Amino acid sequence: MEKENEDKKIVKIVTITMASMFLGVVLLILSFILLPKFLNGSGRRLFPEGKYSMTKRVLREKYGEEFIVHDVYSKASHEYFADCSPVSNKEVAFRAAVWKDGSGVVYDEYLESIVARELKNEIEEELQKYFDSVFVKVYLSYRVGSDTFYEEVNSMQDVTMEAYVRIVNPSWCRIDIGIDAEEGNEHLEEEYAFYESMQKKISDKKIPPMDVYYYDMDAELQEWCSSYFTQNGQAYGTYDSKCHECNEMTYRCTAEGVSITYDEFKTMREELSKYE
């Protein structure tokens, strides 16, 4: 009798275990089917299509022009983030925070993206003298007062870095630069002199202090990074992880000068080029 009871317990345990395993497999399959519909490639929660049209509307009401909305995702209980570009310049991507009830824009970085592009183009133009391919991304800190400044300009496309810094006074500027470090070492002196020349612009308050991050990137990764920022207003997980896999060097450029000497710059760049 005891053996029979033991056998029944074993059968019961095996049955429950098998049922649990079956349920686990079913849930796993459902997660592969449903999760991609719930999350996008960045792991963000997707919003209904209506939020895309709502974002376009509130930006159009604010700026009087049409926008493309690349992505919409959660930030907080009363607002959400959106990555957008103006139809007039699809290469300028920026982030906007929008009230979830559609009552308007909490804040956005459209102005910062327009201004950052001026400095990005200047740095690219210089570095393309020394490298076959270059990736440059400039981030300007958002400051309260950007909206007031916008009201004083006639056109977003006419905004200059000098006027923006003079009125808004952003506190910092980060610059990500991707280069093939094995190229261009014979031009290190000219390259360093270019950053030294930024000292006068910073001291004249034409640009904010710059934190410069150099990454040793091949041309393929440079192209991927450039493409990434045609749809993303800020750097997210995928971009950061790719950059962290690269060897890097950093320094700071302020009104007082570059935070490293030319000899230090040369040594760091030469060390960067030694890595495979």
Image: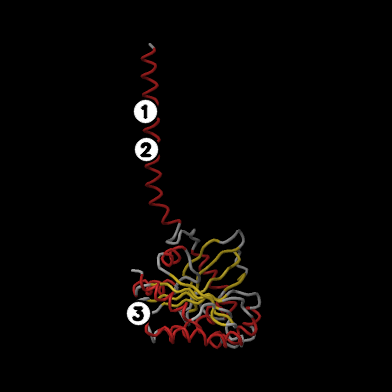
Nearer to us in this view, 8 or 127: 127
Residue 165 against residue 83 in the figure, above or below: below
Please rate how many residues cluster around mark 2, counting C-alpha atoms within 10 Å: few if below 14, some from 14 to 19, many from 20: few
**Residue 125: where, in percent of width, then height?**
43, 86
Give the mark nearest the N terminus, 3 or 2: 2
Rendering coords of residue 10 (x, y %): 37, 23
Q: State which quadrant residue 37 falls in.
A: bottom left
Q: Nearer the viewer, residue 71 or 133?
A: 133
Per the model, the C-alpha gap separating discs 3 and 1 is 65 Å
Q: Amino acid at mark 3?
A: Glu
Residue 204 is situated, as x and y percent measured from the top left of the image, at 61, 88
Which type of secondary structure does the marked residue at label 3 adopt?
Answer: loop
Task: Indicate which label's residue lies in the foreground, 1 or 2.
Answer: 1
Residue at image mark 3: 183
Find residue 172 and report its horizontal and vertical position in percent: 58, 76
User: Where 98 sits versus 192, above or below?
Assistant: above
Cα distance, mark 3 to mark 2?
A: 57 Å
Name the residue carrying label 2: 22
Question: In this rendering, which labeled residue sits more in front, label 3 or label 1?
Answer: 3
Q: Answer whether residue 159 is visible to the viewer in this image.
A: no
